Each structure stands twice: as C-alpha cells, then as structure tokens.
Amino acid sequence: MIIAIVTIATFFFMEFVAWFAHKYVMHGFLWNLHEDHHVRDNHDDFFEKNDYFFIIFAIPAMFAFIFGFTYQIDFLKILAFNS
C-alpha cells in the first residue's frame, strides 16, 4: 500500500516539476535553448536546440535507473519509473 501512495505522490510531484521546469527553466535562464521551439524561422536542421532538453532531463532518469537497480535503492527505482 505504501508503494502505491509513494508512486502516486511521485507522479503528481513530477507533474509539478515538469510545469515548473517548463515555466521557470525553459522559459527562464535556458530560453536560448528553448526559443527555437516557439519560433519557426528558417529551420534547415533536423534537430532544434530545444532537443538538448532530452539529454538534460534524461541523464538524471538514467542514473536513477542504474543506481536504483544496481544498489537496490527503492526510492530511486520509484523515481526512475515516474520520471
């Protein structure tokens, strides 16, 4: 039962983190990476600078999976599945 509660709480917390990151990080100090996602001028490249956010946000999730399952840290396992 406690795992279900933690999982649901983590889900809602991560939704807040996603909203916060989009509003205050992507539209804040990392606007130079995110701007080309909103401005559609002369896109000759297949990828946008905005695509770097995949790497920025995927690295912590990968570490949560790796360390959570390697060292059997339940908190990191739950965090990894909800990220």
Image (cartoon, rainbow, N blue to C red):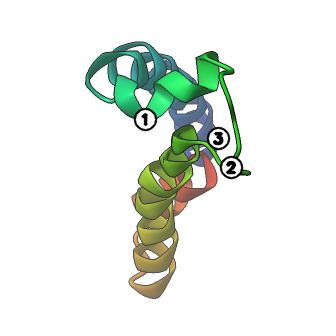
| Discs 3, 1 touching: Cβ within 8 Å | no
Residue placed most toward the observer, 63 or 1: 63
Residue 1 is labelled as none
Kind of residue at badge 3: Ala
Residue placed most toward the observer, 76 or 49: 49
> Of helix, strand and loop, which one carries label 3?
helix
Kind of residue at badge 2: Asp
Which picture quadrant has residue 40? top right
Residue 74 visible within the image: no
**Residue 39, placed above or below residue 78:** above
* Residue behind mark 2: 45
Query: Which residue is rendered at x = 51% and y = 79% of the image?
Result: 69
Kind of residue at badge 1: Leu
Marks 2 and 1, the one that precedes in the sequence: 1
Q: CA distance from mark 3 to mark 2?
A: 43 Å
- The spot of residue 77 in percent (x, y) is 52, 63
Nearer the observer, disc 3 or disc 1?
Answer: 1
Residue 4 is labelled as 3
Residue 40 visible within the image: yes
> Of helix, strand and loop, which one carries label 1?
helix
* Residue behind mark 1: 33
Query: Which residue is rendered at x = 65% and y = 22% of the image?
Result: 41
